[in-house]
Image (spheres, grey):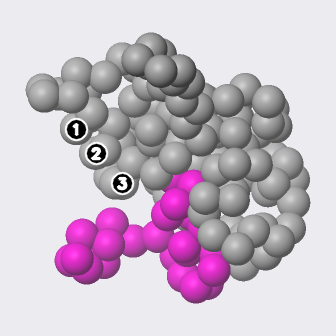
Amino acid sequence: MFLKGFSFPGIQETTTCRVIGEIGDISRFKNNKQLNAYVRIDIGRYQSGSIQYKDHIYKRGNRRLRSMLFFMIVSMLSAKRKGTNHIVDYYYKLKEQPYNKHHKVATIACVNKFLKIAFHLIQHDILYDYETASTNP
């Protein structure tokens, strides 16, 4: 069941097993926002009065899992010729105008999107298919 959430092109079996081992039982999360909070890629904002600092991610969560997910997205980008997926498309969309995101910022945004999609696939017990996902609104 968990492997269906990791059926994206460019993800190897060893990476899948390591990520699943770090996440543990995914059914303990009610939604993808709780999963993001566990990984701690949720946005932290600091503002006081008229002062507002740049947004950043929290770094208190599972460091190994966050690192694995980051490098998993990087390997997806390098293996894009093996198969298309929405994560790679999203990365290149963020790198173009008007967004112009830096590599790390775009990669963390892709980790966020990956966790959303993987959580949905695992909850509904379906495999990732680029064509089916493209036709659904």
Q: Is residue 84 above or below residue 1?
A: above
Classify mark 3: residues with Cα within 10 Å, few (<14), some (14-19) or many (20+).
Answer: many
In the drawing, what numbered circle is on residue 44? Answer: none
Residue 90 horizontal/vertical position (percent): 31, 44
**Please, which residue is most extreme toward the front here?**
49
Three-letter amino acid code at the position of disc 3: Asn
Q: Is residue 23 left or right of residue 15?
A: right
Q: Amino acid at mark 1?
A: Lys
Q: Residue at x 61, y 58 (%)?
A: 33
Q: Position of residue 7 (x, y in %)?
A: 55, 63
- Is residue 53 shown above or below 31? above
75 inside magenta stretch: no
Work out whether residue 46 or residue 15 is closer to the camera in this orientation and state it: 46
Q: Which callout, 3 or 1, points at the residue further toward the start of the chain?
A: 3
Crowding around mark 1 (Cα neighbors within 10 Å: few <14, some 14 to 19, many 20+) is some
Type of secondary structure dominating the magenta stretch: helix
Contact, CB < 8 Å: mark 1 with mark 2?
Answer: yes
How many residues crowd around disc 2 within 10 Å: few (fewer than 14), some, or many (20 or more)? few
Circle 3 is placed at which residue position?
85
Q: Does residue 124 show up magenta in the picture?
A: yes
* Quadrant for the C terminus in the image: bottom left
The local secondary structure at tag 1 comes to: helix
**Which label was assigned to residue 93?**
1
Residue range of the region highlighted in magenta in the rendering = 114-137
- Label 2 is placed on what type of residue? Asp
Q: Residue at x 45, y 41 (%)?
A: 110
Q: Is residue 35 left or right of residue 5?
A: right
Q: CA distance from mark 1 to mark 2?
A: 6 Å
What percent of the width, then of the height, locates residue 98? 13, 28
